[in-house]
Image (cartoon, rainbow, N blue to C red):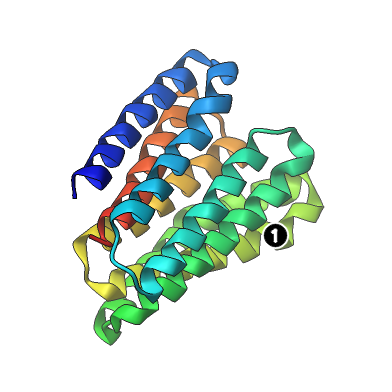
């Protein structure tokens, strides 16, 4: 028990260090802190989470997220690789969460919430991505569809930690997409990472 708690605390320290590096624009420090957060979360799951299919799927999701983090730290040519890695992460989270017998009623609530978000935010991000590079339209649409599915299933589980994780991930990626393809604001860079780390930590905590 103590081992995984210590790793979660260490994850928090690394996350704060990463947020501070983002705020300073310190990309050199982030080559360590950004992937280190995910490595620490993966270690926490391996050390303390109960064995089972959901744990396996969540580890796959965390590994795919780690790959996505590394890809997005590289140049623009790696953007689609990062996008694809996180798409796989969301699919793995969906596979894991699906084992919790989601509620039909809450799935419907999640679907309505995602439709509203797509109308208000998603379509602007897709349009902005297509305007910056027409080749991005299909990958971005696919990604939006998959993360929306993850949110729907997450709300369907009715588990507080998973609901927090799913919604935080959606907020993080919405901020990232808006910053990248619609209108940039420096404060969003930090907000993207805070909500991202909250999401991943919430998914991990839900296993214990």
Residue depicted at 34% across the width and 36% down the height? 11
Residue depicted at 64% across the width and 63% down the height? 141
Where does the image place residue 8, in percent across and percent down from the top left? Answer: 28, 41
Where does the image place residue 119, in percent across and percent down from the top left? Answer: 48, 61
Where does the image place residue 33, in percent across and percent down from the top left? Answer: 48, 28
Compared with residue 16, is residue 84 higher up or lower down, i.e. above or below?
Answer: below
Compared with residue 35, is residue 63 higher up or lower down, i.e. above or below?
Answer: below
Please identify the quadrant where the C terminus is shown: bottom left
The residue indicated by pointer 1 is 139
Query: Which residue is at the front of the view, 117 or 98?
Result: 98
Query: Which residue is at the front of the view, 176 or 38?
Result: 38
Where does the image place residue 59, in percent across and percent down from the top left? Answer: 45, 60
Query: Which residue is at the front of the view, 188 or 78?
Result: 78
Total tally of numbered discs in the picture:
1
What is the secondary structure assignment of the residue under circle 1?
helix
Residue depicted at 79% across the width and 40% down the height? 77
Residue 187 visible in image: yes
Relative placement, left or right, of 182 versus 149 is right
Residue depicted at 35% across the width and 26% down the height? 16
């Amino acid at each position: 028990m103590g081992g995984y708690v210590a790793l979660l605390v260490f994850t928090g320290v690394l996350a704060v260090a990463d947020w501070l590096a983002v705020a300073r624009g310190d990309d050199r420090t982030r080559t360590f802190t950004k992937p280190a957060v995910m490595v620490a979360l993966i270690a926490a799951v391996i050390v303390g989470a109960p064995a089972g299919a959901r744990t396996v799927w969540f580890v796959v999701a965390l590994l795919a997220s780690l790959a996505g983090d590394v890809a997005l730290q590289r140049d623009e040519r790696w953007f689609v690789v990062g996008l694809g890695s996180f798409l796989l992460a969301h699919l793995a989270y969906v596979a894991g969460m699906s084992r919790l017998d989601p509620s039909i009623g809450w799935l419907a609530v999640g679907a309505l919430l995602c439709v509203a978000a797509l109308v208000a935010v998603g379509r602007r991000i897709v349009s902005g991505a297509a305007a910056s590079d027409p080749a991005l339209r299909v990958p971005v649409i696919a990604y939006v569809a998959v993360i929306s599915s993850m949110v729907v299933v997450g709300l369907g589980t009715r588990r507080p930690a998973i609901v927090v994780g799913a919604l935080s991930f959606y907020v993080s990626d919405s901020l990232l997409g808006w910053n990248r393809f619609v209108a940039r604001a420096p404060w969003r860079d930090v907000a993207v990472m805070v909500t991202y780390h909250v999401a991943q930590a919430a998914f991990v905590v839900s296993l214990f």
